[in-house]
Every structure is written in C-alpha cells, then in structure tokens.
Amino acid sequence: MDFSGNRCTPKNIESLLRHTLRMVRDLRKAVYKTWTPTSETAFTLLLLVRGASALLNIITDCDETFNYWEPIHFLLHRFGFQTWEYSPTYALRSYVYVLVHAIVLHVSSGAWNFAAYVHEMLGSSTLSSSKIVQFYTMRAILAILCARTEAAMYRSSIAIMGPQAAQILLILLFWNAGMFQASTALLPSSFVMYCVMGWMHFWIRNEHTKALSCAIIAVLCGWPYVGVLFIPFAIDMVRFRGFWYSVMAGGGIGTLVTVVEVVVNYFYYQKVVFPAWNLFQYNVLSKEVDSKLYGVEPWTFYARNLVLNFNVMIVVAVLAVLPLGFEAWRSNSWRLIARCSRVLLPMYLWLGIMFAQPHKEERFLYPVYPLICMAAAMSLSAFARLLNWKLWSANLTIGKGFVWGSLIVYAMLSLSRLTSNYINYNAPQRVYQHLHDSILPNEMTQALYANPGKPLVLCLSKEWYRFPTSFFLPNNATRVEFLPTSFHGQLPKHFEEHVNGTSVIPSQMNHRNQEETSRYVSEDRCDLVVDLILSDQHDFSGKKDTWNLIYELPFLDSEASLSPYRSFYIPFVSPKYTKFVSYAVYRRMKEPEGA
C-alpha cells in the first residue's frame, strides 16, 4: 500500500489498521495452531520407541515364554517346552496364533540367511543368523505392527477428539511405560491390543465391516473374553447398518475365522477342537476348576499397576467423564459425549470387569492401554478448554501451560519407570545371552565338550519362571531341566521331539495346577545351574567344592528395597534405597581324575 502524500487519508489509515490486525490475528493462529503430524510421521516417531522396546523390553510374564515362545520354537526347531494347555486332552491354546508368528519368523529368517550368504560371498564379515537374531527379529516385527496400528488410531482420532487431544494422544502413546512393555510382548493380550487399535481406527471412520473384522479376529484368535469390549460397537453398528446386515456380516466373517481355527488346530491336535470355547468353558463355565488356582489378588493390584504405568494420567483418564460431561453441558452439545463414549464405555466396561475378577494379571489390562491413553488425552484437552473459559484466558496460555506441564511430569515419571525396570530386571536375558554366546555348546564348539553326543544339562532353580525362551539356546545340544524348589505348582514338560509332537497326549499333566514331581531332576544331573543368590539363601554359593560361579549380574532384591525408589529410578537417590543381589550361573566342578 502506498500511504505517501495525499493518500494518507483517514480511510487509508483505517484500512492499514485492519490489515495489520488481520496479520497479527493470522500470526497468532499460526503460533497457537496445534501440530498434528501425518500418519507417516506419527508412525516414524512411534517406531523409534517401539524399536527400543524390541531391544530393551524384558519378559515380565512366564506365560509369554512357555505358552507362546516355546510352541513357536518347537514348530521351527523341533524342541521346546509344552504346557498343559497345549495337551490335546485340554486344547486351551490355539495354534493359529502360534503358526502365524512361526511362519513370519521362518520367512524373515530365510531372508536373513540369504542376506548373510550374499554378504559372505561378497567377502564381507559373516552376518549372525543365530536363534537370538530370530528372537529379536520377531520383536522387531511386533514393534512395526504396533506402531502402525497406533499411528492409524491416532490419525483417525482427530475426527472425534480434535487436533489438540490427538496431539496429546500421540505424546501419551510415545512416552507410556505400559505401551512400551505391551507393544513387543508375544502375548494374545498384546495381539488383542493391536486389534483394538485397528478396530477403533475403522470405527471412527465408520468403516463398520473392517472394524467388525478386527473385533472378531481379536475374540476368536486372540482372547475370547474381550468380546465385552465390543458391545458398544455392536449396538452402534446395528443402529447405523441395520440388524440383518450386521448379523450377516458378523456371521460371514466369524464363520471364515472359525473354519481357519478348526482346520489349523485339527492339523496340530489331530482332533476337532475350538480353543476359544475351551478356554471360556474352563475359566467361566467349569464347576471343577477356575482361574483362582493361579493366584488371587485384591483390587489394589490393578490400581498399583495402572499408577506405575500411567502415573498421573490414570487419574485424568478415569475421571474423563467429568470434564467432558461438564463441557457438553456448558456448550449444550451432547454429541461430544456421544463421540467420546466410543472410547469411554469400552474402557470403563473392561476395567470394571477386570477389577472384579479374583485372578489378576497385568497383561489382562493390555487391551485397553490405548483406550486409557485416548481417554486421558480427551480429558486433559477438555480440562484445558474449561480452564481457559473459566479464567477468561483469551490467549490460551494458562490452558496450554497446564497441558504441557502435565505432559512433562508424565513423561519424566514414565522415563523413570522404564529406566527402573531395565536397571533392576534386565539381568536374566543378559545372563542367557551370555550363555548362548560364550558357554553353551553350538555347532562350532559342540565337539570340544567331554560327551559331544550327550546334551549338556542346564538346570533352573527357583528362577525357572524367568527363563526367557529356548531361542537363547544355540541348539538341542543343551537340555533345560528343573530342580525342586518351594514352588509346588505344575511346571511345563518337554514336547515329544518328533513331527507329530503336538498331537501326542503327554503323560503326567493335569488341569488343576497340581505339582508333577516327574518334572524335576536331581542336582547331580546338572552341568550348569542358573540361580538367584539371595542373602538368606545359599543353595549353590555354599557348595564351593561342587559348583563354581562363572558369571553373575546384579538383580534387584525387591524385598530389601524401598518403594518408590525401586519402582521409579531417581538418579543419585535410588541406589541408596535399593539393594541388588547376584543373578548367577554355576558350573559343576570337574571331578579329579581317578575319583
């Protein structure tokens, strides 16, 4: 604009002021505009932390090892442990879940071996193709799958939550300690979590048939109990798509999945079984046994775990209905509650049912971890808007300050929790990796052992439940056995090592968690022992004439450590209030010649 000379009129000055105000307003909008990354950017960001989980995540549940890693290992390498749930007599576990992972791992291992061959042909150093590489390859694939479904759910959530809440959701997912743990766990509950995120993505987009597919696969191939999560969706689908369309679509998809389940499980069990029904019947309908056999916990067990994994955000999530309800009342827009109910109803329903069950496991909450993050994001965003409205904060500074202050506290506590878990409990996997790399016989060193045709016996004492998986054994030249301990439940048994091993009915197995003494071997059969050296126990450290300590790493003694310093790592402070003992490997001393 030219305001020189006689053009500097009141009208032009007014126009200049309007133009300046418009520029200021546009600049202000740009400053306060919420950054919502694209799906690809979100996937890349989430893959960074999920990749870290693949490398650093610890196995927290022996079910992951013995019910999933071991059957996969058996399908690929023809040896491993079998739990009673895989006995054809009971058939509580589906081989579909196991087979899919085994196929993916077999294909990826073939590609890796081909790359190693080409690498060697080119004269470069040989790439490792050990079974530990297979273990981490599987975890990497799980990390990619989780990050992909998370990114899809985040991006679609903008439609019902708005850009600010979606941005908060992405931050919550990125830093969450629970998601870090669940994302790369080889468990049906983690698989169901992926399905829940896919289901939510499609439901928000009103792609009901695709959402229904995710729900049915989660129930029939993952975990039958999660069907209750999808009740609000079923009602919504009937309302929008009609009763008969919903029934026909559900029946068609369900029939297809059921046929796959029956055919695959018939191949491995050599009988017609439907594991999802067997599992439901055992845990819900059976009058003889129930899940209480495996431990009973008070409601505080879940409350404590949710606080550890979500810290301040669990309160924000659980109370989400309050700020959202008040905002809906203030704006007279109940459509907000209708949209948010897609997240809140399944979350409240699942938490209510799980808290009421006597048998509790942390993994049972995995399916709703993403929904808890969504609820917290909606709640925090709504509270910030109400704060700005109540205080007449036109520049949004107070609301944004509250949000970012809460997120910083959340991120710091989450990082502290993750650091604590790794420092305190990473010893078992590192010990077994050392065994794999330096001690156990492999193809190169097997002939050097005294009896190369006889397996080396690696015995597990009271730390049997922290055995990571047979993927940490180079080959079947090592045989893992159990020693008697204070635990008197039922331990797993070796699969029959032949092609039909999955269909053989194993002896001495029961469905009541009763101890089977046939699982134990005597100490004199052991060549190596893995044990935890506690201050009040000296099982092997006190037998220096028989056992030689060859490797040890620090492991948290939780009984002698104080909380919250053992639960959250505080630099320079936690070491003063935590105590570590040795996670140790012992080797039998060689008997003197002529003895």
Image (tube, rainbow, N blue to C red):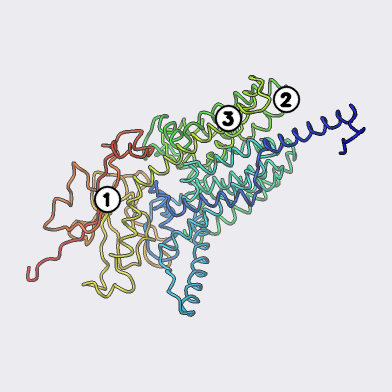
**Mark drawn on residue 333:** 2
Labels 1 & 3 near each other (Cβ < 8 A): no
Outermost residue on the right side: it is: 6
Q: Earlier in the sequence, mark 2 or mark 1?
A: 2
Please, what is the three-letter code of the amino acid marked with disc 2? Answer: Ser
Report the residue at 86% width, 31% height from top.
15
Q: Position of residue 75 (x, y in %)?
A: 45, 63
Q: Is residue 225 above or below residue 452?
A: above
Residues marked 2 and 3 touching at CB (< 8 Å): no
Q: Secondary structure at mark 1?
A: strand
Instruction: Say which residue appears at 68% left-offset and 40% top-offset.
Output: 204
Give the spatial CA distance, label 1 vs label 3: 45 Å
Q: What amino acid does circle 3 point to?
A: Gly
Query: Which residue is labeled 3 in the image?
Result: 401
**Dot 1 or dot 3, earlier in sequence:** 3
Rate crowding at label 2 as few (under 14), some (14 to 19) or many (20 or more) other CA atoms within 10 Å.
few
Check disc 2 and report its element: helix, strand or loop: loop
Which residue position is annotated with label 1?
583
Camera-side residue of 371 and 74: 371
Name the residue type under label 1: Tyr
Label 3 Cα neighbours within 10 Å, binned few <14 / some 14-19 / many ≥20: few
